Image: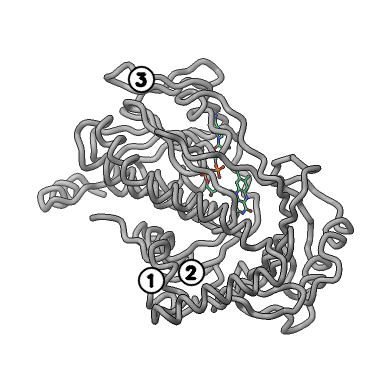
Amino acid sequence: MTQRLRSILRSVGWTCDGDSPLHVILVGSGIGGLAAALALSARGVRVTLLEQAAAIETVGAGVQLSANATRLLFRLGLETPLRAVASAPEAVDVRDHSTSALNLHTRLGAFGEMRWGAPYLQIHRADLQRLLLDATASKRSVDLRLGAKVEAIDDDGARAYARLNGGEAIAGDAVIGCDGIHSTVRAALWGERAARFVGQAAWRGLALADRLPPGIVAAIAGVWTGADRHFVHYPVRGGALINVVGVVEQRRWRAESWTAEADRSLFAADFQGWPAPIPELIAAVETPWLFAIHDRAPLARWSKGRLSLLGDAAHPAPPFLAQGAAMAIEDGEALARHIAARPDVAVALAAYEDERKARTTRVQAWSRRNARLFHLPSLAARGLFGAVAQVDRLRGAPPEARLDWLYGYQPPS
Ligand SMILES: Cc1cc2nc3c(=O)[nH]c(=O)nc-3n(C[C@H](O)[C@H](O)[C@H](O)COP(=O)(O)OP(=O)(O)OC[C@H]3O[C@@H](n4cnc5c(N)ncnc54)[C@H](O)[C@@H]3O)c2cc1C
């Protein structure tokens, strides 16, 4: 952009890439760090993004992005690339595995897009990460440093500091920990505490759609419930891949790696006797992974002076409401809005935390509640889902209304 164009834009109140005198240091370039970098950059704030990995490994499987997240990503200019690589399910169907009875049908697709103002999309995590990385790479005001592991943070009142493993200290106006559930920044701010193993492990993998019998999986998100386990499948990458997750209550497997390969026959044994398409999906998974699920109780506070947290570093939850990435993306938008609006960074971070805490705590509680709901024995599940449907009928509300607070979220302007 030429100097002349910049001065014209500024004269009509626009901010340009890198305009603000503020400089924010983000620790961690997961979905949360990348989305926050874009949101800050869109408000003219300069960003240094510090990532411990020497190269960005685009690993993982499926991620669900409900309307509250896609709306914000679209505002960052990502609508076209997102729609190009994602899949848009028509509905979420929750079925009992023993009878295949449909206990809950939530409409998404065009209905959801109309109701919540943006689509519900399912995407390969690697695709989302690549897309965010490409967008940040095009921003002059974002400096991504790989192989930059943050070991300590500090705030002397006038500046905030991130100290790297090699000893280098980087100064900025704020340091925000976007460094995931085992956050170094969180430990430095609020003390070292181990994450809590929730007593469940998730089998995960991606099945090649063309290895499946034709028509066996619909263009929906399918959830199959059972006593002490449940199974989820949904298409990603335009339907070429089906993301597969089987969650089992167990105490044996405690490893948290996203890439720990596991034995397919054990995966199949855990869901033996479950109806189609479950055995077919397990057989078609390219590489089965096993991942022990951890979470943490909500923090009393996130921010201290010029230091704060974002995404899983602040409010990790088990994945049963599919809101981990969405909450991190919402956090990034709120952080950027408060930082850009207030000259005092510590005041901005306190306001950011105030705005975000109640909502993310509610999401953490709902995520835990869903873990119990999906693992009820058949009769109890039928009774409970039936009672919920009856309440909806009495209220004259469609079942989707229960999700308005979550998917219909509009950040304050
Ligand atoms: C490798 C991986 C694979 C995943 N796969 C899936 C999946 O398949 N499906 C799904 O739903 N969710 C997945 N998730 C989780 C999901 O991405 C997150 O829950 C959600 O997007 C919130 O992200 P976040 O940015 O807050 O944290 P994270 O995604 O955990 O990102 C944290 C980032 O911080 C970096 N970091 C950590 N410590 C430091 C440090 N000291 N200094 C510098 N950098 C640091 C990490 O390397 C990482 O890049 C995955 C997460 C990871 C890390």
Mark on residue 116? 1
Q: Secondary structure at mark 1?
A: helix
From this viewpoint, which residue is outermost toward the left?
11
On the picture, is 91 further left or further right than 205?
A: left
Report whether residue 156 is seen: yes
Q: Secondary structure at mark 3?
A: strand
The residue located at (40%, 70%) in the rendering is 118
What residue is disc 3 on? 155
Question: For mark 3, does the 10 Å Cα neighbourhood hold few (<14), some (14 to 19), or many (20 or more) residues?
Answer: some
On the picture, is 142 further left or further right than 347?
A: right
Q: Residue 90 at what x, y percent from top left? A: 54, 79
Do residues under tags 2 and 1 come within 8 Å of each other at their CB atoms?
yes
- Name the amino acid type tagged 1: Trp
Q: Residue 208 at what x, y percent from top left? A: 74, 69
Estimate the spatial distance between the alpha carbons at disc 1 and disc 3, rounded to whole Å: 40 Å
Question: For mark 1, does the 10 Å Cα neighbourhood hold few (<14), some (14 to 19), or many (20 or more) residues?
Answer: many
> In the image, is residue 174 above or below residue 97?
above
- Name the amino acid type tagged 2: Tyr
Do residues under tags 1 and 3 come within 8 Å of each other at their CB atoms?
no
Q: Residue 167 at what x, y percent from top left? A: 51, 15
In front: mark 2 or mark 1? 1
Question: For mark 2, does the 10 Å Cα neighbourhood hold few (<14), some (14 to 19), or many (20 or more) residues?
Answer: many
The picture quadrant where one finds residue 303 is: top left
Estimate the spatial distance between the alpha carbons at disc 2 and disc 1, rounded to whole Å: 9 Å
Q: Secondary structure at mark 2?
A: loop
Ligand 1 within 8 angstroms of badge 3 C-beta = no
> In the image, is residue 333 above or below residue 163?
below
What residue is disc 2 on? 120
- Name the amino acid type tagged 3: Asp
Task: Compare residues 130 and 219 and report the one nearer the observer.
Answer: 219
